[in-house]
Image (cartoon, rainbow, N blue to C red):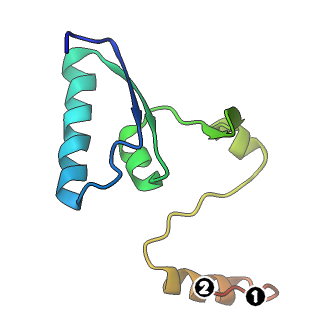
Amino acid sequence: LSKPKFLILDEPTNGLDPTGVIQLRNTLLELVKNEDISILFSSHQLGEVEKLADRLICINQGKIIETPMNILEKQKYLIKVDDMDKVVEVLNNELKELSFEKL
């Protein structure tokens, strides 16, 4: 490769083990910082997106459907889940009028 100014990466962490994901993340962050490269990164792994992205959009069937400002304006909520059983327990305790279950 020469020195590109822009990279497009489609699901680059798919199939990588945790060590590979970390190595790729560090490499991408170094490229952005040291080589002044912009990266368009598509992923379903929101945890990785959160660690890498400085801007975010949600695309469905080729159309932008959400942006962070859109989400805030619509008062939607994003929940980061580490322990699904704990989430179900908390939601059932806090929102007794609703019933939540783990699928």
Q: Position of residue 36 (x, y in %)?
A: 27, 15
Q: Is residue 99 left or right of residue 103?
A: right
State the CA–CA distance, disc 2 to disc 1.
10 Å
Q: Who's the residue at 66% across and 87% down the image?
A: 101
Relative side of 96 to 103, left or right: right
Q: Which residue is mark 1?
A: 99
Residue 94 picture location, percent across and down: 68, 83
Residue sitting at x 31%, y 55% = 15
The amino acid sitting under disc 2 is Lys
State which mark lies toward you, 2 or 1: 2
Q: Which mark is residue 102?
A: 2
* Mark linked to residue 68: none
Residue 51 versus residue 5 in the image, above or below: below
Q: Quadrant of the C terminus?
A: bottom right
**Number of marks present in the image shown:** 2
The quadrant the N terminus occupies is top left
Dot 2: element: loop
Q: Residue at x 19, y 20 (%)?
A: 34
Where is residue 95? Give x, y as percent: 74, 83
